[in-house]
Image (cartoon, grey):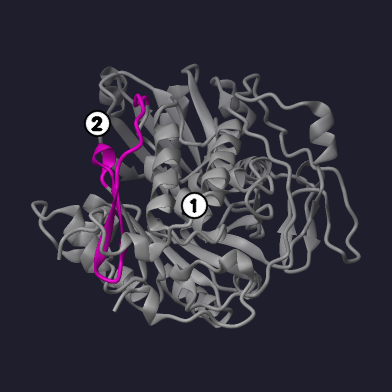
Amino acid sequence: MSFLTSISSPPQINSLFCSPIFSLYRFHAPSFSSLYHRKQSYGSGRIIRELGFLGDFRGKGRVTSGSMGKQKGGFFWVSSPCSSGGSCSCSSSKGDEFESEEDEEEVDDEEEVARSFCVLPDRWDVLGLGQAMVDFSGMVDDEFLERLGLEKGTRKVVNHEERGRVLQAMDGCSYKAAAGGSLSNSLVALARLGYKPIGGPALNVAMAGSVGSDPLGGFYRAKLHRANVNFLSEPIKDGTTGTVIVLTTPDAQRTMLAYQGTSSTINYDSCLAGIVSKTNIFVVEGYLFELPDTIKTIIRACEEARRSGALIAVTASDVSCIERHYDDYWEIVGNYADILFANSDEARALCHFSSKESPISATRYLSHFVPLVSVTDGPKGSYIGVKGEAVYIPPSPCVPVDTCGAGDAYASGVLYGILRGVSDLKGMGTLAARIAATVVGQQGTRLRVQDAVDLAESFAFNLKGSSSSVSSDVGSDHISSL
């Protein structure tokens, strides 16, 4: 029996979610709005001093309500001017108190004014739950690492004193600061793909997590908002926001130092329950499994998402994280996940396969437990698994510049295809591969605004002229042999 013949579409399902892939799942009709977005790039050592890093790292710097436009808006906090249809008053949102001179993309001021408001949606198309970390990325030499006693090519969790020591040593170096994280990369790309009503209504994208009330927390929330992603969690009073320092040497090896700050604590409360109950796709970032006691929050959030009819997606995130928290991963993947994102190494780790096993085998195995499995294999291509079969997706050609963020971009393409009601796995995977190739062909992890618009327009054109379906892929030459 094919995958299609085993399912029937529930009545009154919103047309946006009529993809046969997920017609088993019931959705609530979403309400859509278009939010203004803008990408900013931060550079130079000045940002350290502006964000108050030199000195005590206890997060005593506070973001005022005026600088953040902070106001209670129902069950979450709003970091932008808004009209929720209720009685809340609107205030201007600066959110860029710590601007540097560099901007990758300049936006017309008139357009910014015209779109600097939002109407809060009744439901979110995608809500991501993940680590909210500010990335500091810079180029250093081997001597810099040796001087600080850092092992090249490793990822290390550090305390705030160690973080301060490294940031102080970086003062005067050329680097960028950004609202980083694997999940936020995917959400920003998705928001930019769905910013305009191309092939369907504009998409509402949000994130929940943990940031402090320090300047970095305000920086993070403001940058996500500029990228059309609403950060809905209330900042933790007197808390410190997590950071990841990414040090790249001339041989392209990256050494990462993670300071979790308050992002090491994500509690399940009425705020989180409220927003999870009003989303159509709920995405859980795998890095959360390494935080103490967070598995309890993830389980409760997934249970609420399931009760509300949302699809649940899980990102594998990291091989070492899977190995350390294998049982927790499978608690969520085996019992709740409808969509799984992994690279080939992460997929093998989840399967307890050796490195000799092919990514096709891992994809097929995982798809017996998860309805839709996406496995990327770098320049070799990718696979989308459904009910024990794996559709091969060839890589999209590009001249590689920076492979960081490729998997995050790919995931955004799969989510975008689902939200646009795509029924063709090959077409969905091809779009995801094109998005990933676009990011690989540039410096930086974020899909640029104009590239996103071009990709969305091209996808809508191809989708309109396509009559293929999932069943045309299942059983074709593109399916791995049994």
Q: Residues within 10 Å of mark 2 (few under 14, many from 20)?
A: some
Q: Which residue is mark 2?
A: 152
Task: Check disc 2 and report its element: helix, strand or loop.
Answer: loop
- Mark seen at residue 466: 1
Task: Check disc 1 and report its element: helix, strand or loop.
Answer: loop
Is the N terminus in the top left, top right, bottom left or bottom right quadrant?
A: bottom left
Q: What amino acid is labelled 2 in the image?
A: Lys
| Magenta span contains residue 397 | yes
Task: Give residue 381's position: percent from left, percent from top.
Answer: 28, 43
CA gap between label 1 and label 2 equals: 48 Å
Disc nearest the viewer among 1 and 2: 1
Seen in the picture, residue 46 relative to 338 is either above or below; the reply is: above
Residue segment shown in magenta:
377-401
Res. 127 image quadrant: bottom right
Res. 391 image quadrant: bottom left
Seen in the picture, residue 264 relative to 453 is either above or below; the reply is: below
Say which of 453 and 266 sits in front.
453
Looking at the image, can residue 363 be seen? yes
Seen in the picture, residue 297 relative to 60 is either above or below; the reply is: below
Say if mark 1 contacts mark 2, CB within 8 Å: no
* Residue shown at 64% from the left, 80% from the top: 12
| Magenta span contains residue 302 | no
